[in-house]
Amino acid sequence: MERLIGVDIGGTRTRVGAVTEGRILARKEFPTRGVAEVRLAIAEVLRAVGWERPDAIGVGAPAPLDMRQGRILQAPNLPHWNGVNVVEELRRAFSCPVYLGNDANCAAVGELAYGWQAKDFVYVTWSTGIGGGIVAGGRVV
């Protein structure tokens, strides 16, 4: 059973959840600020579920991102995150693999895995910003 942490960094709110086998065991939501608040929220969620550390952390954030370097780049509605290497910061703090992806693509992957089992669709996000993830033939494109 994998012990996973999911982080959704939004323009106004950030959500952190502990997940296993597709079930959310604990979650925390708070105003979006910086990486220090995310580290604290992850630690709080880990304590709530009794895990010492997660097996992996996935972070969804609005574009533009440098996913190879693990950085959030010049997001106009995320000034505290511009240039932050979120992957390295969280990897160092929690000693586990950390993955960064576009928030809409991450949501599309979740829908693909746990939704209506459609293999071709467009997932549209509409909150502080607007985005979308495209799935064709069961793969995010």
Image (cartoon, helix red, strand yellow):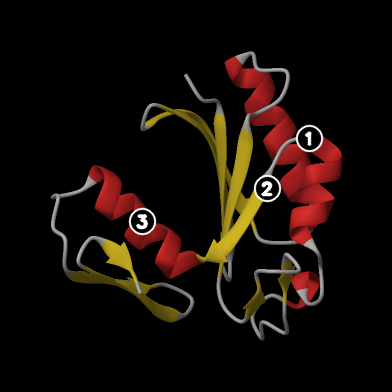
* Residue 36 visible within the image: no
Disc 3 on helix, strand or loop? helix
Q: Earlier in the sequence, mark 3 or mark 2?
A: 2
Disc 2 on helix, strand or loop? strand
Q: Amino acid at mark 2?
A: Val
The numbered disc on residue 94 is: 1
Q: Earlier in the sequence, mark 3 or mark 1?
A: 1
| Number of dots carrying numbers | 3
The residue under label 3 is: 109
Label 1 crowd (10 A; few <14 / some 14-19 / many >=20): some
Q: 59 above or below 46?
A: below
- The residue drawn where x is 44% and y is 59% is 106
The residue under label 2 is: 98
C-alpha distance separating marks 3 and 1:
24 Å
- The residue drawn where x is 42% and y is 72% is 127
- The residue drawn where x is 25% and y is 43% is 114
Q: Nearer the viewer, residue 128 or 43?
A: 43
Contact between labelled residues 1 and 2, with CB atoms less than 8 Å apart: yes
Determine the image quadrant of residue 12. Answer: bottom right
Q: Amino acid at mark 1?
A: Phe
